[in-house]
Image (cartoon, coloured by chain):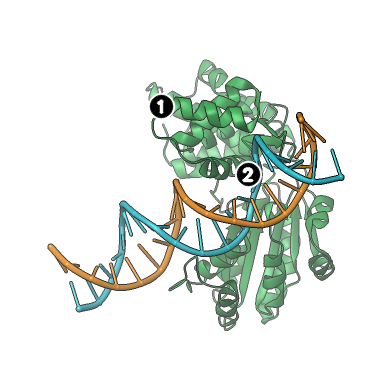
Chain colours: A green, B cyan, C orange
Amino acid sequence: MIVDGRVLREDFVPSEVVHRHDEVNLLSESLEPLLSDRRADPAFLFGPTGVGKTCIARYALGQLREQEPSIDVAYVNCWQEYTRFRVLYGVLEAVGRTVDIHRSTPKDELFDRLRETDARPVVVILDEVDQLEETAALYDLHRLGHVSLVLIANREEELFASFDDRVRSRLRAGTRVRFDRYGTDELAAILAERAEKALEPGAVSDGQLRTIADAASGDARVGIGILRSAARRASRRGLESVTDDVLEAAIPDARTAIRRETVEGLIEHQRVLYDVIAEAGEIDPGDLYDEYERRVDDPKTERTLRNYLTKMVHYDLIEAVGERRGRTYRLVGDDAVGRE
DNA sequence: CGTCCACAGGAACCCGTGGCAT
DNA sequence: ATGCCACGGGTTCCTGTGGACG
């Protein structure tokens, strides 16, 4: 029943956008200078999770490249690439200049490398910029005359609060595009669009799509997640269409579906840590390390565990309460709908 | 108040892997 | 097959910090 699973993936960019024309137009306008070989002011996309910020950014840039193929586009997700080095590296990768670079390469050389690419304009999309730990990367990129920035984040105030003065003053100008949550109707329309491309005709009814949209409460990512999960369950059972009880089974994980996928992506040792934390509810580091060592045959060093833990915090799976001594770890609250 | 301890996280290094030329 | 090299995960070593405790 699944015809094209790619359409249900999170990073899928539709060829037509539904319900976001104003936002697309605003962003496209702000990028217009690039068409006459000038640099665009930074563009900001703000809004909660699952409202199409990333999707619209990619879509708009895709259109821009159709008009002007000489423009390079670099997409960097600061959720994963949160250091200055990794961001610069990510941009270089997009313009194909990563040969010979490794960890020991001085950062300034990365910067120089980027400077040398100024023959072609580059648009750098930084997704989840609020996760960036070294805003120096922004300063670097802004210094480069051929780089235009598209920055994606949840909230404007918080984003600017995390900037240092240098960066803040430089990025004050620029277009703000704000995204609101989808209404049930809008989300249902989006899901219908996806279902039409991804699934066989009639695989899912309009009523079911509304049910999904409702359960997702305005978050397209959750909605698409439910749809995907329902379609997979149905096809695993050899069904021709999504039945209501399949859908019923897919919805309860609405809130946790995305997290579960992330958890499944964890390597074994990280999973053990996760499990220990989940079972304990809240646990301090010493006990956590001890329990981990008890459960695993070939335990990693504590230092490595700390790396795992910070990574899991970044993935929003767990949170660390407090600093240094007296810190505890626990799962992020279930009331947290994504990060906001 | 000084010392100790628990913990976080940076820097340098080590080592296995995998691509590539020889 | 052999050696080289980039690269990344993991480890070792280490510094900084702030609460606990004598």
Work out whether residue A235 or residue C10 is closer to the camera in this orientation and state it.
C10
Q: Position of residue A98 (x, y in %)?
A: 47, 71
- The C terminus of chain A: image quadrant: top right
Q: Position of residue A167 (x, y in %)?
A: 79, 67
Q: Position of residue C18 (x, y in %)?
A: 79, 42
Q: Which quarter of the picture shows residue C5?
A: bottom left
Label 1 chain ID: A
Q: Is the residue A282 above or below the residue A31 in the image?
A: above
Disc 1 crowd, CA 10 A, few/some/many (<14, 14-19, 20+)? some
Do circles 2 and 1 both sit on a common chain?
yes
Work out whether residue A28 or residue A137 is closer to the camera in this orientation and state it.
A137
Label 2 chain ID: A
Give the number of the disc on residue A235.
Answer: 1
User: Dots 2 and 1: beta carbons under 8 Å?
Assistant: no
Disc 2 crowd, CA 10 A, few/some/many (<14, 14-19, 20+)? some
Give the number of the disc on residue A204.
Answer: none
Q: Is the residue A115 above or below the residue A323 in the image?
A: below
Q: Can residue A85 be spotted in the picture?
A: yes
Q: Amino acid at mark 1?
A: Ser
Q: Which quarter of the picture shows residue A200?
A: top left
Which residue in the structure is indicated by mark 2? A314
Which residue corresponds to the image point at 70% horizontal and 66% vertical from the top-left?
A: A136
**Mark 1 element type:** helix
Return the disc, 2 or 1, that comes first in the chain's sequence.
1
Q: Amino acid at mark 2?
A: His
**Mark 2 element type:** helix
Which residue corresponds to the image point at 50% horizontal and 65% vertical from the top-left?
A: A103
- The N terminus of chain A: image quadrant: top left
Which residue corresponds to the image point at 84% horizontal and 66% vertical from the top-left?
A: A165
Q: Is the residue A191 above or below the residue A62 in the image?
A: above
